[in-house]
Amino acid sequence: MKRLVIILALILSFVFGVAAANAGKIEDVKKAGVLVCGVKDSVNLFGFVDADSKELVGFDVDVCKYIADKLGVKTEFKVVTSKNRIPMLVQGSVDILAATMTHKFSRDEQIDFSITYFMDGQKLLVKNDGVVMSTADLVNKKVGTVKGSTSEKNIKNAQPKAQVISYDEYPQAFMALKQGKVKAVTTDSGILAGLKAGAEHPEDWAIVGEFFASEPYGLGVPQNDSAFRDFVNKSLNEMWIDGTYQQLFKKWMGYDLPSGWQIELWPM
Ligand code: GLU
């Protein structure tokens, strides 16, 4: 009998222990009163430092703020790079990633993703002199991109004869283009548009060629926490339905959201 009681006690403590360990991100975040968002700090339009306020701003920053509002908590931002963003989420340094991140099955092995919240594809940013007009013109040429980005592989698929040079951040890749060290920068067209718009003479640069890779962005969320993932997906649906998404798109991209794409809407 005594043995049975001990076994029962062990089972119960295991069950409740697991339940406590899996309390979930929603409860944790509400208890802390803050949602820690991993965002970029050098990607114009999406996550960057405002020159006047010195605050982190951008489309991804606003998406994170919207989700924090829905949770009824404040936001704290931590800067991530393409290379360290997934490890930072896995380690729990951030609660969520809004970081120009494409959801891919290979990345899904370590973290989970929201539904697609931004749709883009990859192109080339080049000098506006007509020399490089597509990936076909990059045979034996150097192309810059960023460590840990999908572009590293995509450009190799699109032009196996290009030499890929990976930098830590996109502004460094753009600097290399300005200095003639690479003939093109490749990544998502929205990021390239941000680099061009932020240049001293935007007209000196051109975004060229066809899309050669499709890049649906997902918010990164911790693995196997479906309550949190559902909450994030529902918030994204609400963001679309209440018009905030369309407003933010216009605010940051500078033009109306083109028709033909919408967030995956689930009936409520
Ligand atoms: N969306 C691509 C990716 O997730 C490129 C942008 C980035 O480096 O964050 O890798």
Image (cartoon, rainbow, N blue to C red):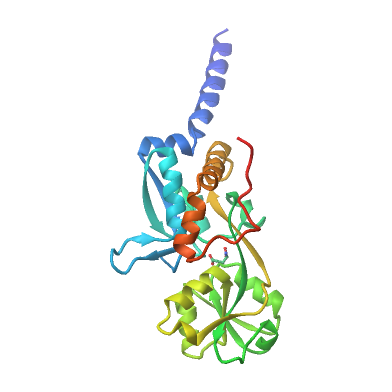
The residue that appears at 67% across and 55% down in the rendered structure is: 105
The residue that appears at 54% across and 68% down in the rendered structure is: 190
Q: Of residues 12 and 130, which is closer to you in this image? A: 130
Q: Answer yes or no: is residue 161 visible.
A: yes
Residue 27: quadrant of the picture: top left
Q: Is residue 179 left or right of residue 111?
A: left
- In this view, 134 is above or below 117: below
Q: Position of residue 148 (x, y in %)?
A: 55, 67
The residue that appears at 57% across and 72% down in the rendered structure is: 187
Q: Answer yes or no: is residue 93 visible.
A: no
Q: Of residues 24 and 227, which is closer to you in this image? A: 227
Specify the quadrant that holds the C terminus.
top right
Name the outermost residue toward the top.
1
> How many numbered dots are placed on residues in this image?
0
Residue 237: quadrant of the picture: top right
Q: Position of residue 140 (x, y in %)?
A: 66, 90
Q: Position of residue 146 (x, y in %)?
A: 53, 72
The residue that appears at 53% across and 71% down in the rendered structure is: 147
